[in-house]
Image (spheres, rainbow, N blue to C red):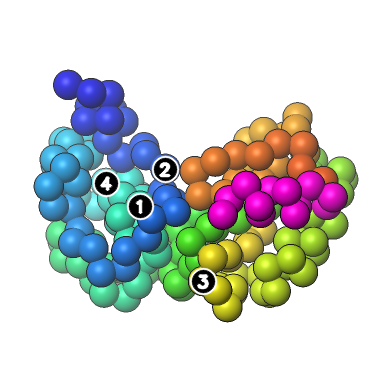
Amino acid sequence: MSDALHPAVAGAQPSQRAEKNPEAPLFEGDYRDRFERVLSRYPNKQAALLPVLNMAQEIRGWLSPQTIARVAELLELTPAYVRSVASFYTMFSTRPVGKHVIQVCTGIGCDLCGAQAVVDKLLEATGTRIGEVSKDGKYTVVEVECLGACGFPTVVQVNDRVFENVKAEDVEGLLAELD
Ligand code: FES
């Protein structure tokens, strides 16, 4: 059995991949197995909500009203409750996103080391505003509070990849690496 199927890690996969399919079936095939293993770790279905939302976003790219309704149905919760949880955490997207979700840490550590210049450069280079999808569908830039690598500012996470020590002048090269 691979680690990815062990209940302890079944819901701990990256929640953003470059391949996004908002129409993909939820929790079928291998994902059905992961879903069941996640549920087995918790005393009730409600307690499994965060890892299940994480998996739903991994599968579909973002949490649409339809996806939220399906998660609510599977976990025997109301859609309003699931939406309230999904919209509370910045790692969940409740709006469509580009192929590459670019999260820039603007927490205090990164902010003191030029994070805003990195954000500005990314927005300029992608032709977007915060949270928008670029016209070519490739990019969405968002700000996040801390990516847990405070010793390496500015930290940028693109889908499931983390880039450290990013400066504004690195942005063009970073985007070129993604295509
Ligand atoms: S403050 Fe930027 S990673 Fe923590």
Residue type at mark 2: give it.
Pro
Instruction: Decide if residue 173 is on the left or right side of residue 11.
Output: right
Residue drawn at x 35%, y 52% as measured from the top left = 58
Residue type at mark 4: give it.
Ala
- CB atoms at circles 2 and 4 under 8 Å apart? no
Residue type at mark 1: give it.
Glu
Which of pointers 2 and 4 lies earlier in the amino acid sequence?
A: 2
Which of pointers 2 and 1 lies earlier in the amino acid sequence?
A: 2
Secondary structure category for the residue under label 4: helix
Instruction: Decide if residue 157 is on the left or right side of residue 42.
Output: right
The CA distance from mark 1 to mark 3 is: 18 Å
**Local crowd size for mark 3, using a 10 Å CA cut-off: few (<14), some (14–19), many (≥20):** few
What's the magenta bit mostly, secondary-structure-wise?
helix
**Local crowd size for mark 4, using a 10 Å CA cut-off: few (<14), some (14–19), many (≥20):** some
Q: Which mark is residue 58?
A: 1
Report if residue 78 is visible in the image: no
Mark 4 lies on residue: 48
The CA distance from mark 2 to mark 4 is: 16 Å
Relative to 123, residue 105 above or below? above
Residue drawn at x 66%, y 52% as measured from the top left = 176
Residue drawn at x 77%, y 37% as measured from the top left = 165
- CB atoms at circles 2 and 1 under 8 Å apart? yes
**Which of 142 and 169 lies nearest the eye of the viewer?**
169
